[in-house]
């Protein structure tokens, strides 16, 4: 069977003879180095993808993509017309009115600051995933005039309250009475508890009541603080907010999730990019080791090269011979690294749980890392970039060394 001479001899050189096992050992070390670099890079990026996904899920499940408020006052009077205007667009999928108020919650001698949101339960479910975060009760248990309240799990425990407890909500507004100016307050019955997870303080500071109860509590009449809106692509929120202001809601103040959490997601993306380039140095070090291996191979094969030159082999053919050998090491090392990296990435959670169980340690705390387990998410784009970078580094190192080696052979 016909085989190109460069490919035939290059593959033959990858198998060490008895007298040069050391060269084979160097080649194996180079291959293992590339494999470890690729595996570590895949694992680390997958874990960072997992953390990024967890953060996004927690933020977008509680924070609406777009918020519309009045630019001139603290409330919107004719919010129904604003909602109709939003529904007339082809990019707003749902909207819901809300009243936001900073209050003090008091129960059993304990006082905690909180952000209370007055909502319409049926419409709020179209905007956020708070209904899916309920651990006791249901969002639809909020009834107009019932003065029920749903609290975050941590906030409930801090107050020392429980389901059925009556907590007092104290607002910044004041009321005039015969005894003077007194704060406006109202007792609410705890009818539900939600758990959004640690990391952003949702469980520690949020509470929900019915919109009509909030209007009575805050003295808003039929007004609301603003409206929340959802869209199909949350990453298009800044562009859509600008369009709303310019085309539909002149004079309104339109903010997005990016105004509050955009810097956080930018930092996560930047950290992932920097980790990619830093860990890429591991593969570069392995590729440099591959250069050392080829230097020794070229030196050891000087007599073979001279014979090939005598039979008419050109420097290009000789360069291709050693590029075949170096390239094969790079390809096999990258393939092994991908396999090993995927095994680690897909089983990262179980591996960490096993380490915690064996050594009786707790590696991840939800108070610090948002989650109490190691998330991992493999993305095809990351695998593709890693493979391309690894193969490029391997072939570039091979080509550089082989060009120098083949040029030196011409003088033999």
Image: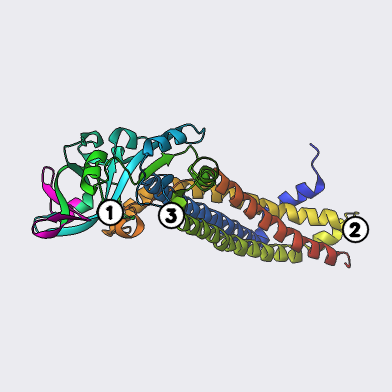
- Where does residue 106 sit, x and y in percent of width and height? 14, 55
* Disc nearer the start of the sequence (3/1): 3
Q: CA distance from mark 2 to mark 1?
A: 66 Å
- What SS does tag 2 mark? helix
- Horizontal arrangement in the rendering, residue 137 relative to residue 33 (left or right): left
Label 1 Cα crowd, 10 Å radius (few <14 / some 14-19 / many 20+): few
Which quadrant would the C terminus be assigned to in this image? bottom right
- Where does residue 123 sit, x and y in percent of width and height? 33, 34
Rendered residue at 91%/54% (across/down): 312
Q: Can the viewer see residue 370? A: yes
Which residue lies under the disc numbered 1? 357
Q: Nearer the viewer, residue 4 or 230?
A: 230
Which residue lies under the disc numbered 2? 310
Q: Nearer the viewer, mark 3 or mark 1?
A: 3
Q: Which residues are magenta?
A: 156-182
Check residue 261 in the rendering and tell me which mark sits there, or answer none.
3
Q: CA distance from mark 3 to mark 1?
A: 35 Å
Label 3 Cα crowd, 10 Å radius (few <14 / some 14-19 / many 20+): few
- Horizontal arrangement in the rendering, residue 79 relative to residue 144 (left or right): right
- Horizontal arrangement in the rendering, residue 119 relative to residue 178 (left or right): right
Determine whether 238 is above or below 286 in the image.
above
Hey, which residue is sitting farthest front in the picture? 178
Magenta stretch containing residue 201, yes or no? no
Which quadrant would the N terminus be assigned to in this image? top right
Rendered residue at 67%/63% (across/down): 293
Magenta stretch containing residue 164, yes or no? yes
């Amino acid at each position: 069977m016909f085989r190109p001479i460069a490919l035939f001899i290059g593959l033959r050189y990858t198998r060490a003879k008895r007298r040069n096992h050391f060269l084979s050992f160097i080649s194996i070390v180079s291959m293992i180095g590339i494999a470890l670099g690729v595996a570590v890079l895949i694992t680390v990026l997958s874990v960072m993808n997992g953390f990024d996904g967890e953060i996004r899920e927690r933020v977008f499940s509680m924070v609406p993509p777009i918020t519309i408020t009045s630019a001139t006052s603290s409330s919107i009077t004719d919010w129904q017309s604003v909602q109709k205007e939003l529904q007339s667009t082809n990019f707003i999928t749902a909207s819901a009115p809300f009243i936001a108020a900073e209050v003090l919650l008091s129960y059993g001698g304990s006082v905690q600051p909180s952000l209370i949101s007055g909502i319409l339960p049926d419409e709020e479910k179209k905007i956020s995933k708070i209904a899916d975060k309920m651990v006791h009760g249901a969002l639809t248990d909020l009834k107009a005039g019932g003065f029920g309240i749903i609290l975050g799990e941590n906030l409930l425990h801090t107050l020392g309250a429980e389901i059925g407890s009556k907590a007092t909500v104290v607002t910044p507004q004041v009321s005039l009475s015969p005894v003077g100016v007194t704060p406006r307050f109202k007792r609410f019955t705890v009818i539900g508890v939600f758990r959004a997870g640690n990391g952003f303080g949702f469980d520690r500071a949020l509470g929900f009541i019915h919109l009509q109860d909030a209007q009575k509590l805050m003295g808003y009449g039929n007004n609301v603080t603003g409206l929340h809106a959802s869209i199909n692509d949350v990453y298009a929120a800044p562009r859509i907010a600008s369009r709303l202001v310019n085309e539909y809601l002149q004079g309104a103040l339109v903010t997005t999730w990016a105004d509050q959490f955009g810097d956080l997601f930018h930092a996560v993306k930047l950290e992932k990019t920097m980790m990619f380039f830093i860990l890429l140095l591991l593969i570069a070090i392995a590729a440099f080791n591959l250069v050392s291996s080829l230097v020794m191979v070229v030196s050891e094969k000087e007599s073979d090269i001279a014979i090939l030159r005598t039979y008419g082999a050109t420097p290009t053919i000789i360069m291709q011979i050693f590029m075949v050998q170096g390239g094969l090491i790079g390809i096999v090392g990258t393939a092994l690294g991908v396999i090993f990296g995927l095994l680690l990435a897909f089983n990262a959670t179980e591996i960490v749980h096993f380490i915690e169980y064996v050594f009786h340690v707790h590696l991840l705390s939800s108070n610090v890392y948002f989650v109490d387990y190691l998330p991992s998410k493999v993305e095809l784009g990351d695998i593709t970039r890693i493979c391309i970078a690894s193969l490029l580094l391997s072939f570039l190192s091979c080509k550089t060394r082989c060009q120098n080696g083949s040029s030196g052979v011409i003088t033999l």
